[in-house]
C-alpha cells in the first residue's frame, strides 16, 4: 500500500490540531457566558442632570453691554434625578495657564429650585436634594474659562 505525501501531511495536521485543541478548549472555558462579577466600593449614578444656558446676547463671561445682566452670565442648572439625588457641594475654579485657581473677579450666585439664594457669596456652595442654578457672571479678561466641580455627599 502506497501512502501519498498528501495523506501524511493531512495526518500530521490532524495531530497538531489535536494537540492544540485541549489548551484552546481550556482557554475558551474561561470566557464562557455566566459567572460572577464582584464590585468593591460603590456604583455611582449621576444624581443631577447638569446643563448650561446663556442668553442670545451672551459672550461667555464677558460683555460689552454692562447694563444687560444676561449678556454676561452663564447659568449651570442642576436638575435632580428622580428618587436618587443626594446633597452636593459645588465649587467654581478659574482655568489658568498653570492649572486651576480660585476666581478673583468672577461673580457667582446660587439659587436652589425653591428660589432661595445661597447666603454666602463666593465660589463654594452647598446644594440640597432639590438642585438649583449656579450663575457665573463677568470677570477679568484673564478669567474667561472655569471648571465647575460637583462633590456628592
Image (tube, grey):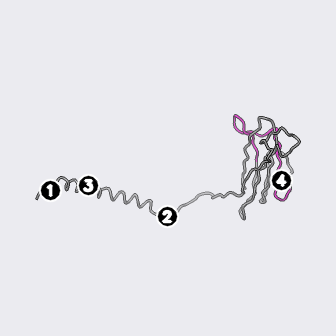
Crowd rating for badge 1 (residues with CA inside 10 Å; few <14, some 14–19, many 20+):
few
Q: Which mark is residue 3?
A: 1
Q: Residues within 10 Å of mark 4 (few under 14, many from 20)?
A: some
Chain-order first, disc 4 or disc 1? 1
Looking at the image, residue 71 lies above or below residue 23: above
Which stretch appears magenta?
A: 91-115
**Numbered-mark total:** 4
Residue 129 colored in magenta in the image = no
Tag 3, which secondary structure?
A: helix
Task: Give the residue at mark 3.
Answer: 13
Q: Quadrant of residue 20?
A: bottom left
Tell me if residue 103 is in the magenta stretch.
yes
Disc 3 from disc 1: Cα separation: 16 Å
Distance (Cα) linking label 4 and label 1: 91 Å
Up-down relation of residue 13 to residue 145 (above or below): below
The crowding category of the residue bearing disc 2, from other C-alpha atoms within 10 Å (few below 14, some 14 to 19, many at least 20), is few
Residue 103 in picture, x, y percent from top left? 78, 40
Work out how far the residue at label 2 is from the one at label 1, CA to CA, in angstroms.
49 Å
Q: Which mark is residue 35?
A: 2
What's the CA distance linking mark 4 and mark 2?
48 Å
Q: Position of residue 121 (x, y in %)?
A: 85, 46
Residue drawn at x 26%, y 57% as measured from the top left: 14
Q: Which sits in the foreground, 58 or 107?
A: 58
Q: Is label 4 in contact with label 2 (beta carbons under 8 Å)?
A: no
Circle nearer the viewer, 2 or 3:
3
Amino acid at each position: 500500500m502506497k501512502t501519498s505525501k498528501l495523506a501524511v501531511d493531512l495526518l500530521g495536521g490532524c495531530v497538531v490540531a489535536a494537540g492544540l485543541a485541549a489548551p484552546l478548549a481550556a482557554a475558551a472555558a474561561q470566557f464562557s457566558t455566566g459567572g460572577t462579577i464582584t464590585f468593591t466600593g460603590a456604583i455611582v449614578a449621576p444624581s443631577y442632570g447638569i446643563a448650561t444656558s446663556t442668553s442670545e446676547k451672551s459672550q461667555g463671561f464677558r460683555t460689552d453691554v454692562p447694563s444687560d445682566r444676561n449678556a454676561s452670565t452663564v447659568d449651570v442648572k442642576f436638575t435632580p434625578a428622580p428618587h436618587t439625588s443626594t446633597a452636593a457641594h459645588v465649587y467654581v475654579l478659574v482655568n489658568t495657564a498653570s492649572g486651576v485657581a480660585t476666581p478673583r473677579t468672577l461673580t457667582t450666585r446660587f439659587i436652589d429650585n425653591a428660589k432661595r439664594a445661597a447666603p454666602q457669596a463666593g465660589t463654594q456652595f452647598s446644594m440640597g436634594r432639590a438642585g438649583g442654578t449656579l450663575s457665573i457672571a463677568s470677570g477679568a479678561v484673564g478669567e474667561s474659562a472655569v471648571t465647575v466641580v460637583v462633590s456628592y455627599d
